[in-house]
Amino acid sequence: MNKKEEDKIRKALKGKSWNEIKTYDSWQIFKIMSEFVEGFEKLARIGPCVSIFGSARTKPEHPFYKVAEETAYLLTKKGFGVITGGGPGIMEAANKGAHFSGGKSVGLNINLPFEQHANVFIDPDKLIDFDFFFVRKVIFMKYSQGYIVLPGGYGTLDELFEAITLIQTQKLVHFPIVLVCKEYWNGLVDWIREKLLKEKNISEEDMDIITVVDSAEEAVTVIDQFYSKYSLKPNF
């Protein structure tokens, strides 16, 4: 079912009874299933990948854009694929770096009424469009062997803390989560240490889930050392 068809259905439901609306909600299950199936089928074949997150609002002339591009370029030269949210800003920069290094460039795009559109640096056979954020996040978690997080807003924080929580609760294999730009992230990390840890809402070892660095080279080194430690091989 495409967006136009869904819009027609929504208009048709206007003024309908609660039971009629609930029936429509039940049919949404099939749309959700189709997004999961497409995501599983496409990403199961791409090999080890690292997800790069950050703001969709970051402009190409911004230093963070350049860092994201360089990070993706270095990662793919190491043999890793790169997964992004598929949109503009930091996501575009990461897909661009992967594209021009000749590496795998994956985009998990979310359909939004503003801000988000798929960038042109995603491999055509590795672009997936989602209507449901929760489906998209499951795909991110399932097929990422590491997270590199650049400065971003609410969406970036949502994805970051989702991964931290799943690793903390052992629902996800412990992979590296790297925050790039100490000036941007240290205030948050200090708050976590001074508030959450001090109040014993997290454990000391939970602080080890994240690593804060200042450059693309440092971020890639963290990922590379993790793979080397466990004798995991990227896509060479």
Image (cartoon, grey):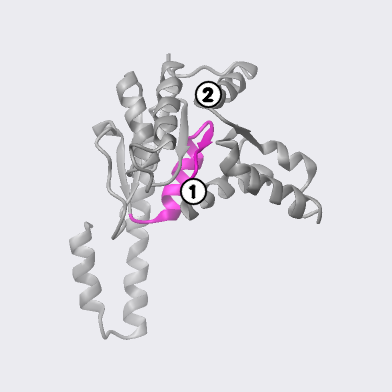
Residue type, mark 1 in image: Thr
Evaluate if marks 1 and 2 touch, with contact meaning CB atoms under 8 Å apart: no
Expressed as whole percent of the image width and height from the top left, the position of residue 12 reads 20, 77
What secondary structure is marked by label 2? helix
Q: Residue at x 33, y 56 (%)?
A: 131
Q: Is residue 155 in view from this perspective? A: yes
Q: Residue at x 38, y 32 (%)?
A: 94
Residue type, mark 2 in image: Val
| Residue holding disc 1 | 156
Closest to the observer, 25 or 111: 111
- The relative height of residue 35 versus residue 233 in the rendered view (above or below) is below
In this rendering, position of residue 171 left or right of residue 104: right
Expressed as whole percent of the image width and height from the top left, the position of residue 92 reads 33, 37
Q: CA distance from mark 1 to mark 2?
A: 19 Å
Expressed as whole percent of the image width and height from the top left, the position of residue 141 reads 51, 41
Q: Residues within 10 Å of mark 2 (few under 14, many from 20)?
A: many
Residue found at the far top of this picture: 236
Write down the region rendered in magenta. Answer: 131-151
Q: Which mark is residue 45?
A: none
- The relative height of residue 117 versus residue 218 in the rendered view (above or below) is below
